[in-house]
Image (cartoon, rainbow, N blue to C red):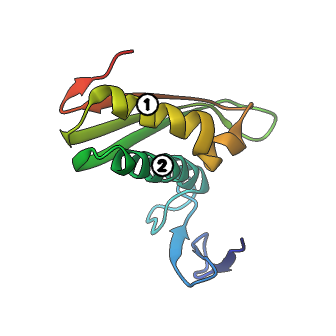
Amino acid sequence: MKITLNRINDEYLFECKNSIGNSILLDNISQTKETKGVSPMESLLMAVAGCSGIDMVSIMKKQRQTLTHFSAEVEGERVQKDEAKPFKTITVKFFLEGKIDPKKALKAAELSFEKYCSVSKTLEPNVTVSYAVFVNGEKVEI
C-alpha cells in the first residue's frame, strides 16, 4: 500500500492520493482561517468510521439484514504527551435503520472492533476504542 502527498498551496493544504488516483485533502485547521481539507487527526477518526463501517455493512449483508440507512459519529479525546496530542480514547456511535435484528447489529460491531477493523487494531493498545449501536432509534444493549 502506498500513498503520495503533494502540497497544493502556499499554506498547509495537501492532496493525498492512493495508487489508483483517489484523493483527499488535508489541511492544518488550527493554523488556517479558511480550511479546504480535514486535519490529519480528523482523517484518523474518519478512517476508524470507514473501516468499521465497511466491516459492519459486509457482516450485515452476510446475515441477510436489510439496511436502509447506515451512519456513524466518531469522537476522539486527546491528551498532551510531550509536544504531541495523541488520542487517548475514540468513541464510535453507529446508527442503523431497516429490517435489522438488533443483536446481529451489535455482533457485527463487536466482530469489527475485536477481529476485523485494521485501523482500530493499529491503534491498540495506545488508544481505547469503544462503540455503541443504535437500531431504528433505540440503543442496543447487551
The reply to whether residue 92 is in sight is no
Depth check, front residue: 26 or 115: 115
Q: Earlier in the sequence, mark 2 or mark 1?
A: 2
The quarter of the picture where the N terminus appears is bottom right
From the top left corner, tell me how far across and down residue 127 is, in percent. 67, 32
The reply, left or right, for residue 110 in relation to residue 137 is right
Number of numbered markers: 2
Q: Disc 1 on helix, strand or loop?
A: helix
- Three-letter code, disc 2: Asp
Q: Residues within 10 Å of mark 1 (few under 14, many from 20)?
A: some
From the top left corner, tell me how far across and down residue 68 is, in percent. 19, 50
From the top left corner, tell me how far across and down residue 69 is, in percent. 22, 49
Q: Disc 2 on helix, strand or loop?
A: helix
In the picture as drawn, the residue positioned furthest to the top comes out as 142
Separation of residues labelled 2 and 1 (CA atoms): 11 Å
Give the residue number, with chain letter if any, for mark 1. Answer: 107
In the picture as drawn, the residue positioned furthest to the right comes out as 82
Depth check, front residue: 120 or 60: 60
Give the residue number, with chain letter if any, for mark 2. Answer: 55
Q: Where, by quadrant of the figure, is residue 72 drawn?
A: top left
Q: Residues within 10 Å of mark 2 (few under 14, many from 20)?
A: many
Q: Where, by quadrant of the figure, is residue 9 drawn?
A: bottom right
From the top left corner, tell me how far across and down residue 82 is, in percent. 82, 34
Q: Where, by quadrant of the figure, is residue 129 drawn?
A: top right
